Image: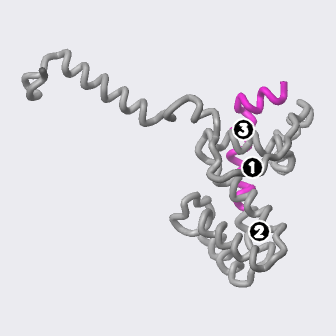
């Protein structure tokens, strides 16, 4: 058996390095392949019927994040892509803002605003989006007198960030390339 570092036979050192490598690999990968393929929602979500777009329709997304997000299949593909990159908070924030704008009840609006703020805006939020201090301050001020446009500035900043950064990566991805074939 292996005793003390000085007395370690060469094979014990090799075995220790092998175990360390395997542990490191296990910590970086999902538990199983199925966990990587299937995204388990935190809570049950409404299933939106999506039909695969034509290649011509998908080609238009290259030049328009707005068209991509308006298409339920495109939005879903974009979300899945960003989840694989561990950067889905931006599109999730954008979608939450769109849902917030549709809310009519002041009580529901206040609840949704609080949830969006706590999940995406506040410092150290679990899924904090990358907005500058000015935008954060304006958004917080807008929350004092709540309206459907309270998150507009932050949403526009995140849209611009996705358009500049996430969309080009998505366009280069295999997911997108398969859609335009």
**Was residue 31 drawn as part of the magenta stretch in this picture?**
no
Looking at marks 3 and 2 on the same chain, the residue that comes earlier in the sequence is marked by: 2
The spot of residue 48 in percent (x, y) is 82, 46
* Residue at 51% in and 35% down: 30
Cα separation, mark 3 vs mark 2, equals 24 Å
Is residue 101 depicted above or below 25 in this figure?
below
Helix, strand or loop for the magenta stretch, by majority: helix
For disc 3, the neighbor class at 10 Å (few under 14, some 14 to 19, many from 20) is many
Q: Quadrant of residue 156?
A: bottom right
Residue depth check, mark 3 versus mark 1: number of the one nearer the observer:
3
For disc 2, the neighbor class at 10 Å (few under 14, some 14 to 19, many from 20) is some
* Residue at 86% in and 45% down: 71
**Was residue 165 drawn as part of the magenta stretch in this picture?**
yes
Say which residue label 3 marks: 170
Label 2 with label 1: CB-CB less than 8 Å: no
Residues shaded magenta: 157-181
Cα separation, mark 2 vs mark 1, equals 16 Å
The spot of residue 154 in percent (x, y) is 70, 66
Quarter of the picture holding the N terminus: top left
The spot of residue 59 in percent (x, y) is 86, 35
Which numbered circle lies on residue 163? 1
Label 3 with label 1: CB-CB less than 8 Å: no
Q: Quadrant of residue 83?
A: top right
* Residue at 53% in and 68% down: 123
Say which residue label 2 marks: 152
For disc 1, the neighbor class at 10 Å (few under 14, some 14 to 19, many from 20) is some
Quarter of the picture holding the C terminus: top right
- Residue lying at the far bottom in this picture: please name it: 145
Looking at marks 2 and 1 on the same chain, the residue that comes earlier in the sequence is marked by: 2
Q: Along the horizontal axis of the image, is 51 left or right of 5?
A: right
Cα separation, mark 3 vs mark 1, equals 10 Å
Element type where label 1 sits in the image: helix
């Amino acid at each position: 058996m292996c005793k003390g570092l000085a007395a370690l036979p060469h094979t014990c050192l090799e075995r220790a390095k092998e175990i360390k490598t395997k542990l490191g690999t296990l910590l970086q990968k999902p538990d199983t392949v199925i966990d990587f393929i299937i995204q388990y929602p935190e809570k049950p979500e409404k299933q939106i019927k999506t039909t695969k777009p034509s290649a011509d329709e998908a080609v238009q997304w290259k030049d328009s994040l707005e068209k991509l997000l308006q298409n339920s299949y495109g939005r879903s593909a974009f979300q899945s892509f960003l989840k694989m990159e561990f950067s889905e908070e931006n599109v999730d924030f954008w979608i939450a803002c769109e849902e917030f704008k549709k809310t009519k009840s002041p009580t529901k609006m206040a609840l949704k605003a609080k949830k969006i703020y706590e999940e995406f805006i506040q410092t150290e939020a679990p899924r904090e989006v990358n907005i500058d201090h000015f935008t954060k301050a304006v958004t917080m001020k807008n929350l004092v007198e709540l309206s459907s446009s309270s998150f507009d500035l932050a949403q526009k900043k995140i849209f611009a960030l996705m358009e500049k950064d996430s969309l080009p990566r998505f366009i280069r991805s295999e997911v997108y390339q398969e859609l335009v074939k």
